[in-house]
Amino acid sequence: MLLLFAGSGCLNDDNKIPENCYDGILNNGEELVDCGGPICPACDPCENGQYDALLGETWVDCGGECDPCDPSFNGVQDPGESGIDCGGDTGVACGELCGDGLLNGLEQGIDCGGPDCEPCPTCCDDMMNGDEIGVDCGGNYELNIYLPCDNPNVTCGPCPDGVNCANGIMDGDELYIDCGGANCPECESILTWKANGTTLEAEVDVTAQLSGTTIELGGLTAAGAGLALILEQPLTGWIAGAEVQCSVASGSSCSYVD
């Protein structure tokens, strides 16, 4: 008699196949599936999806010891193309290349500048952009995402001591978390208006009109005995989350409630 046993106990902690370099899964600290990392063979540099110029590649995974580059993807503006690897017979619009991590299309820096992409950052554009940690300071200005500053009196460099507008902490002279002060972006002032517990959406600088006990705000009306606005993010001199309460009584004023 042949007995067949079925069940879910065939694999257990003693006979499971451990993670390995031929399981088709990205594990073991691998750089790519089944290659690289501490225990697997090194990945083929011609198949890693990166531009390894130090290994002799002339573009991503091609040139040098790799296969020759396809003329439609070689990092060069070839005859008939309207930009690097775009336009003409390539079938690729130059604007589609913004965001691919390569300097191509009509870009001035990697994925920035030109007629299609967002402007490239500089260290004198009065903004915190690129990898900066403050307004026009603290970036790695050697990266080719940055354009040279057109002001000869400005030297790109680190932020003053204690300035970090990208650490998620309210520190230094910041007015709120990572905003305000001398070196961080200006805080965005946001107000939420409420009348009798009903939220009325309105811009920060809108004027509330009172007629009897009816409040008109941003095209909406609410009848009742009181109006409040909540400061979700700070205005100078106010604390985030503070409430300003206003009575609808004639001639009354608003009071600040911390």
Image (cartoon, rainbow, N blue to C red):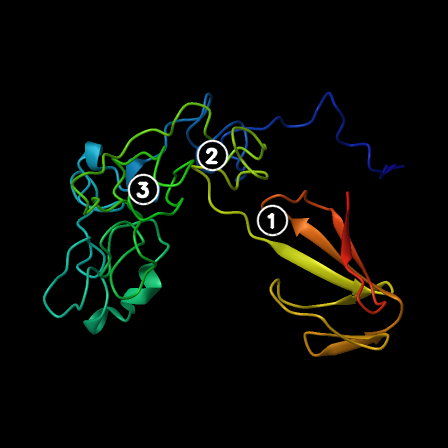
Q: Is 132 situated left or right of 94 in this image? A: right
Image quarter of the N terminus: top right
Per the image, label 1 sits on a secondary structure element best described as loop
- Indicate the quadrant where residue 223 lies: bottom right
Who is closer to the viewer here, 72 or 167?
167
The residue located at (71%, 59%) in the rendering is 192
Q: Is residue 180 above or below residue 197?
A: above
Using the numbered discs, state the Cα–Cα distance from disc 1 to disc 3 in whole angstroms: 46 Å
Label 3: which residue?
50
Kind of element beneath mark 2: loop
* Of labels 1 and 2, the one closer to you: 1
Where residue 34 is drawn, which disc sits there?
Answer: 2
Number of numbered discs:
3
Q: Looking at the image, is mark 1 or mark 3 earlier in the sequence?
A: 3
Residue 235 shows which numbered tag? 1
Residue 14 on image: x %, y %: 73, 20
Q: Write down the quadrant of residue 199 in the picture.
A: bottom right
Kind of residue indicated by mark 1: Leu
Q: At x 21% / y 46%, what residue is drawn? A: 59
Amino acid type, label 2: Asp
